[in-house]
Image (tube, rainbow, N blue to C red):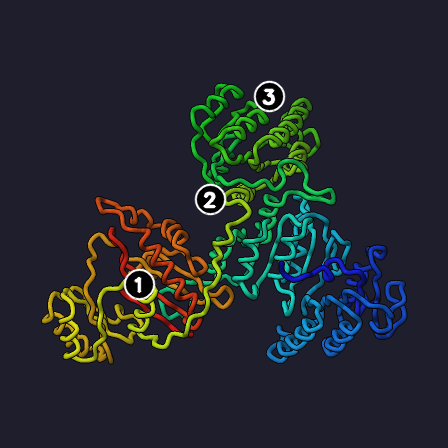
Amino acid sequence: MGRDLTALFDPRSVAVVGASDDPAKYGHAVAAQALRAPDRRPVHLVNRRGGTVLGRTAATSLTAVGEPVDLVVISVPGAGFEAAVDEALACGAKAVVAITAGFAEAGPAGLARQRAVAARVRAAGAVLVGPNCLGIADNTTELYLASDRFAPGGVALLSQSGNLALELQLRAEPHGLGFSRFVSLGNQADVTLVDLVEDCSRHEATSAIAVYAEDFGDGRAFAAAAAAAGKPVVLLTAGRGTASARSAQSHTGALTTSADVVAAACRDAGVELVRTPREMTVVLAGLAGPTGSAGPAGPGAGVRTRGRRTAVFTDGGGHGAIAADAAEDAGLEVPELGGPTQDRLRTVLWEQSSVANPVDLAGMGEQRPLSYADTVGALLDADEVDAVLMTGYFGGYAASEGGLGGGPAGGSVLAEGETRAAKEIVAHLASAAGKPLVVQSMYPGSPSCRVLAEAGVPVFAATEDAARALAAMTGRPRPVDATLVAPLPRPAPPLSDPGYHGVRALLDAAGVPFPAAREITDEAGLLSAAAEFDGPYVLKALHLLHKSDAGGVALRLADRDALLAAYREMHARLGAPAYSVEAMADLTDGIELIVGVNQDPRFGPVALVGLGGVLTESLRDVAFALAPVPARRAEALLRSLRSAALLDGVRGRPAVDVAAAAAVVERITTVAAAHPEIAELEVNPLLVRPDGALALDARAVLR
């Protein structure tokens, strides 16, 4: 059920310690906000000098309040912070919001202080937000403990940045978006992002959860909480660059960046990952819909669908072509409509209209504005259409009448017709079996567009915004299959031999198939190994990081004489302490893959699958997922590669056994997930042939 945060969001009483009459102090802003709802619960202002604050008598201490306080906001200098927390707990506080800074963000000494305070809070059975946060707000319980106001609505905003939260609020307003809650995450010393996502997922007034986070804490737990949320989670994060891969010692590590890890976790958890505050607002407008104090507005609010087959509808060829490109760039499909749907469209449009997709009125809107509604209705009724993107001039006729510019002369009749069309479009949505409609208009603020927006239809000025919002509204519906964020297996005994043959033995015990191999240190051992299995042979120099790059691999050695000659040449050149003699695999009709797992400090084991061999880093045709990866998920990842067509056979080559490869991926990633001491585990190449899969090389790098 997660942690009980009732005292944080709906306390029986509140105290602001550090309340001040000085507008330059944060205690002034929080106190002023807290007093916005004085009749909802007792609000106590505490200032060590006493006197009055904001016209109210201030207590000199929490103890002087004379009654228990459920939630305490602390905004005092760092030197007095611990004493303020201790007094709050002594006075019965069940929740503390710590605005005071100077803790983990200030270095090791501050981190030690922070941990000690958090331990005392937990021992008292209380919860702590912060420190180094900017407060909280809950519009549903009239709890206002942040410096700014947040318009009421259905979005819970969890942010590590105060300024970004303010920007999101400003960008949300034109879309009719409001907020159920706001929490400034701060240092997450006690209450974490995971705790808040879990609580917001249970909060009935929250329809979507928006997160800006730089520090996920336990990233895997965040992904699992988001997957189980049952409502949209939209994430904006920073620090998604390549720095994490600089010190990697394997192809897997070198190819795995923070951006890859976050993207994989979000995909597996069903989280909408965005890059900018604008994109976050666009996605929220699609997923949450405009929500005010009265709740969701109209049949178009927050509609989601499984399919991505999109009908683009326009009143001008240029807008239609641009919108179709934008839709496909956003991951939507814009297929040609089938014969029956085209025939139905011809019954409501005139001869010069295009009905293939994009569907183009070709000027009919000026002759009969209701043709907009007729066309939207026909598209929403078509079984082959999952969603509709309407783009172009709609809104221009009513805009002219409303003095917003645009529209033809004598537009009064057309404006009335366009507004009627908007109302009929809303009526069509009510019976559209949950299919979303998104609109791009040159006049998004026009009266007819406002009719659509107030009914929950997302309306945008930019084509790319409309396409992105629609992409968020299509695809996998909620609830997300939480099994995509697989639980970690129990830790296994640590790997005692991280050498090549030790890693092979570890994987072999898990069912990963390898060719026959023997480790040798001299010519006598080499000849003895060669007698155990027939050639051709492979010779590998061991204890080299990248054997192929160093010339430490010799292939297709036909017999023992060739093997011995290769050994003498390689040993003279490299002087390796040990070598591996192996049976040469049949490479005929095979494809080389790479399977690896990298331990991420935030998300734990992250798996990589892709096209393998010596060109892995050059081709960079790889996909990522949180490990362990079940076989069915592994097969989907392999099918998502750019080179996936090779798996099914090209130019006369037979298809390879993808199911066998996926089963090996599951075994490798499960082993890695059970060994947290292994920083990087890699099988490269994994040879996949029509008759199965065989691991040809393996490597492990310990933490």
Q: Which mark is residue 109?
A: none
Image side of residue 238 versus residue 677, left or right: right
Residues tagged 1 and 3 counted as in contact (Cβ below 8 A)? no
Identify the residue under disc 1: 684
Residue 383 versus residue 249 in the image, above or below? above
In this view, the mark in front (1 or 2): 1
Which residue sits at x=24%, y=78%?
578
At mark 1, the secondary structure is strand
Residue 145 % position (x, y): 75, 60
For the point 36% across and 71% down, which residue is it? 700
Residue 159 visible from this viewpoint: no
Q: Residues within 10 Å of mark 2 (few under 14, many from 20)?
A: some
Residue at which label 3 appears: 368
How many numbered marks have been drawn onto this rendered protein structure?
3
Callout in the foreground (2, 3): 2
Q: Amino acid at mark 1?
A: Asn
Does 399 sit left or right of 238 as displayed? right
Earlier sequence position, callout 2 versus callout 3: 2
Calculate the distance from the C-alpha at mark 1 to the C-alpha at mark 2: 31 Å
Q: Residue at x 40, y 51 (%)?
A: 632
Tell me residue 57's x, y (percent): 90, 67
Mark 2 belongs to which amino acid?
A: Gly
For the residues labelled 2 and 3, the Cα–Cα distance comes to 33 Å
Q: Which residue is mark 2?
A: 331
> In the image, what residue occupies the spot 51% across and 66% down?
602
